[in-house]
């Protein structure tokens, strides 16, 4: 009996697909030579013998896409494609020489040509005219990639991986597309289960379920215990490191999708583990989030090994995750199951960070999940978006949601930072600024570049050293200027990137000469000092009272950074042989608030007050217990809505 039910559903799915493809065929001019249509992840790819007619009249494409309510990709069938050497010759003739074309690669599986260039705008042409000419003359569908103005090994490897795995990705996307477009009955309920990051910071994860769909929003690791790995976490910390997937009685194979908000480890760190143990489904994110994830996840493996732990997964698991990622830009409405539509919006937190809007069913329910967000001034990003089609439930971060979590004016914060640096340099000391490599480091680069280049009183005439993953992360910012605020985007596009200013000195390899030289500023990765370059500098500079360490971001309660902030005078740290040795802390310890990539209390309240439309229910998360509770109480009182601070493992029926 069961086999007949399965067979019947497969037949219905097939009939549904054939009906859709027949509709598309009927709308394509006969002269275009319709060959086939097929699902390709959330999109539909249409293969033609002659694509020129549709490129000459793009209203046809828009009309079909509007009618079927899906993103349409027009491609030439393989026998219509121009020979690759000739196609490359034509591309180089059509594109202006000063576009700075690097590589040109052809992917037969997608009938696409990938053109990497320093100035993608010149490859695209006015209103897409050059791209259209390439497609019409060569029959290959052009895809443009921006070459970063700084070298990035990670970006190069990720792009090469996507190219090398084109055949696998084609099959994978077809399978995902069929699953998304299977026949779905109307759902009667919607449930959310907190798997991590509720009344705490770390291991963020939320399970959303209907009778027909299961997705996870973020799947992270807690910062400190995760680095030690499974073996070192055999004690009490093990329950604090990873999301409660087992407790949710969730089989990995039941998951329809994983949706990521951004690339910090407390939001993505557990995803490769899913693939290690059998997950074969899609992971949705923005393009920068995919590339940043590759950088930070591989760094986690290195940090875990250095700390003497066993990483949860290996590089092959990360590569598998990358090949299963489906990227989406802000504002792109995407079906991720038969009843869930995903749209990303700017979160203002780090490069590619997103708030998530989920439309469930045909108007059944709408969710906005903020991930980590910034609703205030930064030099890098516009503030988080506040306009959505509809909001029934809001899940909002509460990192600084406590009553007293009000940061100082940004201008005052920048001047305070520069004054601390100036006084330390004047005293003949060195300054260490431990930074999250993604986001905070670039913000600091922009502040220092602005003050030291443009304000005479802060022209300190000392080097600013960059060490650790900061260089890779900064390079990625130059590859995605469209995700940055307009003033910074224009600087990068005009070859005036602040990340490549003359004040910065790149450290590659030996650090000894930095310790031997005179005063200087060191921007080092490892924001909470649980690993990374910042710890190595701290060990060498901590005992000298002329030196200063400046914290400009959040340190979790059990981090080394928090212990230093709290005034510990001696810390045992491993030497080059792994032996613990005491490090005396005589250096100046300073914390300068105002640079966080998270919203403070006022900004969180303002964000919700400015949301359009108004949410009907609010759930606080991603904050210490008291902060989540404080923010929920205040939002409930001010917004006159039901506002709660769920605990991990709470299940909430939303509809």
Image: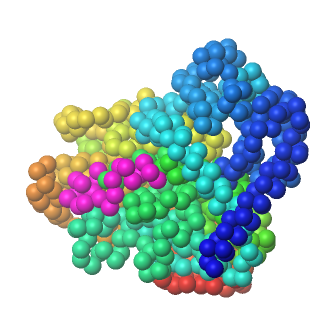
Quadrant in which the C terminus is drawn:
bottom right
Q: How is the image coloured?
A: rainbow
On the image, which quarter does residue 470 sit in?
Answer: top left
Residue drawn at 52 percent across, 36 percent down: 163
Quadrant in which the N terminus is drawn:
bottom right
Q: Quick one: 59 or 621, which is closer to the camera?
A: 59
Is residue 4 visible in the rendered structure shown here? Answer: yes
On the image, which quarter does residue 572 sit in?
Answer: bottom left
Residue drawn at 44 percent across, 51 percent down: 320
Place of residue 104 in the rendered image (x, y in percent of width and height, measured from the top left): 57, 25
**Region of the chain picked out in magenta, as a range:** 302-321
Place of residue 156 in the rendered image (x, y in percent of width and height, measured from the top left): 46, 35
Q: Quick one: 289 or 615, which is closer to the camera?
A: 289
Please give left or right for residue 179 compared with residue 526 in the image.
right
What is the magenta segment's predominant secondary structure?
helix
Residue drawn at 43 percent across, 62 percent down: 278
Above or below for 126 versus 88: below
């Amino acid at each position: 009996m069961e086999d007949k039910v399965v067979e019947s559903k497969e037949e219905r799915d097939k009939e549904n697909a054939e009906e859709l493809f027949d509709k598309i065929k009927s709308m394509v001019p006969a002269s275009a030579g319709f060959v086939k249509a097929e699902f390709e992840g959330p999109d539909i790819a249409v293969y033609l013998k002659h694509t020129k007619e549709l490129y000459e009249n793009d209203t046809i494409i828009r009309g079909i896409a509007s009618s079927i309510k899906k993103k349409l990709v027009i491609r030439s069938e393989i026998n219509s494609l121009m020979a690759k050497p000739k196609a490359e010759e034509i591309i180089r003739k059509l594109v202006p020489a000063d576009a700075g074309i690097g590589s040109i690669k052809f992917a037969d599986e997608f009938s696409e040509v990938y053109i990497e260039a320093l100035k993608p705008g010149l490859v695209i042409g006015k209103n897409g005219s050059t791209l259209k000419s390439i497609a019409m003359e060569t029959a290959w569908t052009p895809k443009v990639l921006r070459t970063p103005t700084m070298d990035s090994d990670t970006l190069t490897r990720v792009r090469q991986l996507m190219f090398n795995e084109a055949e696998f990705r084609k099959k994978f996307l077809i399978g995902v597309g069929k699953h998304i477009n299977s026949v779905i009955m109307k759902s009667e309920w919607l449930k959310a289960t907190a798997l991590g990051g509720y009344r705490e910071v770390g291991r963020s994860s939320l399970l959303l379920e209907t009778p027909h769909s299961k997705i996870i929003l973020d799947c992270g690791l807690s910062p400190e215990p995760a680095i030690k790995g499974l073996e070192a976490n055999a004690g009490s910390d093990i329950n604090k490191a990873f999301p409660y997937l087992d407790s949710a009685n969730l089989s990995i194979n039941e998951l329809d999708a994983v949706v990521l908000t951004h690339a910090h480890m407390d939001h993505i760190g557990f995803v490769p583990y899913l693939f290690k143990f059998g997950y074969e489904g899609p992971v949705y994110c923005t393009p920068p989030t995919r590339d940043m994830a590759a950088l930070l996840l591989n760094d986690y493996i290195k940090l875990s090994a250095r700390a003497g732990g066993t990483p949860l997964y290996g590089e092959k698991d990360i590569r598998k995750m990358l090949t299963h990622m489906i990227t989406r830009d802000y504002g792109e409405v995407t079906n991720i199951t038969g009843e869930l539509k995903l749209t990303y919006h700017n979160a203002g937190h780090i490069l590619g960070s997103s708030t998530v809007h989920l439309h469930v069913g045909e108007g059944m329910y709408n969710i906005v999940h903020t991930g980590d967000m910034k609703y205030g001034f930064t030099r890098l990003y516009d503030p988080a978006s506040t306009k959505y089609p509809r909001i029934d439930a809001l899940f909002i971060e509460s990192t600084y949601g406590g009553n007293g979590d009000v940061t100082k004016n940004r201008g005052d914060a920048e001047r305070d930072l520069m004054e601390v640096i100036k006084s330390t340099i004047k005293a003949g000391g060195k300054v260490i600024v431990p930074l999250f490599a993604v986001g905070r480091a670039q913000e600091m680069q922009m502040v220092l570049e602005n003050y030291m280049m443009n304000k005479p009183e802060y022209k300190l005439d000392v080097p600013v050293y960059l060490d650790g993953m900061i260089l890779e992360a900064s390079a990625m910012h130059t590859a995605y200027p469209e995700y940055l605020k307009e003033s910074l985007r224009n600087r990068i596009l005009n070859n005036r990137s602040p990340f490549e200013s003359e004040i910065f000195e790149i450290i590659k390899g030996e650090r000894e000469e930095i310790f031997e030289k005179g005063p200087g500023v060191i921007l080092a990765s490892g924001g909470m000092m649980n690993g990374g370059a910042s710890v190595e500098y701290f060990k060498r500079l901590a005992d000298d009272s002329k030196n200063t360490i400046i914290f400009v971001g959040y340190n979790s309660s059990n981090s080394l950074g928090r212990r230093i902030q709290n005034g510990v005078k001696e810390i045992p740290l491993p030497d080059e042989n792994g032996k613990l040795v005491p490090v005396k802390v005589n250096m100046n310890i300073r914390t300068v608030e105002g640079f966080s990539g998270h919203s403070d209390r006022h900004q969180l309240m303002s964000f919700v007050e400015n949301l359009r439309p108004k949410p009907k229910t609010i759930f606080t998360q991603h904050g210490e217990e008291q902060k989540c509770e404080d923010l929920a109480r205040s939002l409930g009182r001010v917004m006159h809505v039901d506002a709660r601070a769920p605990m991990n493992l709470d299940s909430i029926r939303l509809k």
